[in-house]
Amino acid sequence: MVKVTVWNENRHEQKNPVVREVYPEGIHGVIAAFLQEAGFHTKTATLDEPEHGLTDAVLEETDVLIWWGHLAHDEVNDVVVEKVKQCVLDGMGLIVLHSGHFSKIFKALMGTSCDLKWREADEKERLWVVAPSHPIVEGIGEFIELEKEEMYGEHFDIPAPDELVFTSWFEGGEVFRSGCTYTRGNGKVFYFRPGHETYPTYHNKDIQRVIMNGVKWAHPVDRKRPIYGNAEPLERIAVKN
């Protein structure tokens, strides 16, 4: 069974009654619930827990880590960020959602500012599938339409994705690379854009399906990891005069 840890800073839920109404169990709670229902083994972790809930024991038992953050990126301890980064390089999958584009872990893995344009105006969003054979879009139609979402617009300062899975169009005219995959070391990273905290985006069945597909895609490959460093020869090296 795939083991998933859903991380959420869990600050909007404490401060904003609108967010509490939309996600009474927290954003992490709703994501963990639909993943659990789909057969994944899930646990949650939040910013204010010791070590942000990402202890060595938790990370060792995590195949895929899902990350949602917004208000408190700077409060995430650099030691924890480095641990998570090393886990990804060692093979753990990472799914970064919405405003997690500015998280320390995503910026550390991308090596860029990860900045973008944004606007809150209750705009319609269409997430167009631009990689129709990709496993992340299994069961999804030509596009996903969200009645209201926060706008993110180009230029999105990220490295060119290994694979671009979704491109969004917004009612105000902007477009955005909304579904991007990367490999980093032995691990796989999926950035998925929608999920502003005041909208019921994570209750949408298509959005849930994409996240479930993303977990399956990002799950570590079952193989021995490559060995790095000085290596003994596999064959006899002939002595040359």
Image (tube, rainbow, N blue to C red):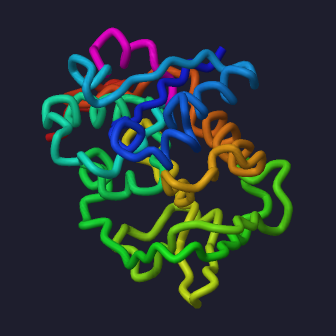
- Asked whether residue 62 is drawn in magenta, I would say yes
Question: Which quadrant of the structure image shows residue 179?
Answer: bottom right
Residue, x 58% and y 44% (percent of image)?
A: 22
Question: Residue drawn at (76%, 50%), measured in percent from left and top?
Answer: 206
Is residue 240 on the magenta stretch?
Answer: no
Residues 4 and 111: in front is 4
- Residue located farthest toward the front when viewing the structure as drawn: 17
**Would you say residue 169 is visible in this rendering?**
yes
Where is residue 240? Give x, y as percent: 19, 39
192 and 204: which one is in front?
Answer: 204
Q: Is residue 116 left or right of residue 35?
A: left
Given residues 81 and 135, the one toward you in this image is 81
Q: Is residue 133 above or below residue 39?
A: below
Foreground of the two, 48 or 226: 48
Image quadrant occupied by the N terminus? top right
Task: Report the magenta residues as a range.
Answer: 54-64
Please report the residue visible at 54 percent of the width from the left and 54 percent of the height from the top. 195
Q: Residue furthest bottom?
A: 173
Q: Which residue is situated farthest in the top direction here?
A: 57
Residue 220 in view (yes/no): no
Q: Residue at x 38, y 44 (%)?
A: 12
Picture quarter containing residue 185? top left
The quadrant of the image that shows the C terminus is top left
Percent coordinates x, y for residue 134 in the rendering: 73, 55
228 with respect to 124 (left or right): left
